[in-house]
């Protein structure tokens, strides 16, 4: 009699089992999402840093303000080891470790995409003026070579062309300003 009763229990619970699995998985995802931490970091440089978006760079960063990572306090000034890696649209910082007391502990955290822009050093007023001067000189040379003399229109046309070409061909860079935090998200 006892064996017959026990054989029905699994059959009664079987329809409930698939419903319990998604609930447990959802609770695990929620717990993981709650444990993700944002870490504000800055460069160790007092100068603006420029990075080519097609290159990987090793770059230690420093924790800007104290943060708690799952019960572990990272004080301001803690060194984060990692690298800038090329991604679509710029670079992403990938943290690999925390350096403290001469030891390095693993850390898995990434930034959002640090967007590349036209290099402002190549599109500044001085750079534009230089491109215009080069273009104007080119226009004057063309006028002299063609033998019709140097005209104001050739010089102005050359200057405008120099500005356009200089701006279009300006390199793209990712810029990290001193004391401008990059937010890392733990994984």
Image: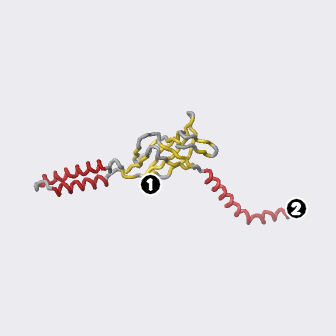
Q: Which mark is residue 2?
A: 2
Image quadrant assignment for residue 177: top left
Check disc 1 and report the residue beneath it: 88
Answer above or below: position of 21 versus 73: below
Seen in the image, is 14 located left or right of residue 117?
A: right
- Check disc 1: other Cα within 10 Å, few if <14, some if 14-19, many if 20+: few
For the N terminus, the quadrant is: bottom right
The x, y position of residue 42, in whole percent, is 49, 44
Element on which disc 2 rests: helix
The x, y position of residue 49, in whole percent, is 41, 43
Tell me the residue at 39%/52% (across/down): 117
Residue 106 vs residue 75, the one in the foreground = 75
The x, y position of residue 180, in whole percent, is 47, 46
- Check disc 2: other Cα within 10 Å, few if <14, some if 14-19, many if 20+: few
Chosen colour scheme = secondary structure
* Residue found at the far top of this picture: 102
The x, y position of residue 127, in whole percent, is 29, 48
Task: Confirm or deny contact between disc 2 and disc 1 (CB under 8 A).
Answer: no
Residue 96 vs residue 18, the one in the foreground = 96
Element on which disc 1 rests: loop
Residue 96 vs residue 124, the one in the foreground = 124
């Amino acid at each position: 009699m006892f064996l017959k009763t026990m054989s029905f229990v699994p059959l009664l619970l079987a329809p409930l089992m698939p419903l319990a699995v998604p609930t447990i998985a959802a609770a695990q995802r929620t717990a993981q999402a709650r444990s993700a931490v944002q870490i504000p970091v800055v460069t160790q440089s007092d100068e603006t840093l420029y990075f080519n978006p097609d290159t990987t760079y090793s770059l230690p960063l420093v924790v800007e303000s104290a943060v708690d990572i799952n019960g572990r306090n990272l004080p301001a000034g803690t060194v984060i080891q990692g690298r800038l890696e090329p991604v679509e649209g710029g670079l992403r910082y990938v943290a690999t470790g925390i350096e403290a007391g001469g030891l390095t502990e693993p850390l898995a955290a990434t930034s959002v995409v640090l967007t590349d822009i036209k290099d402002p050093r190549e599109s500044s007023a001085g750079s534009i003026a230089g491109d215009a001067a080069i273009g104007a000189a080119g226009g004057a040379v063309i006028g002299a070579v063609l033998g019709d003399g140097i005209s104001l229109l050739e010089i102005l046309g050359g200057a405008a062309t120099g500005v356009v070409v200089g701006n279009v061909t300006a390199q793209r860079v990712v810029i990290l300003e001193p004391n401008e935090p990059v937010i890392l998200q733990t994984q």
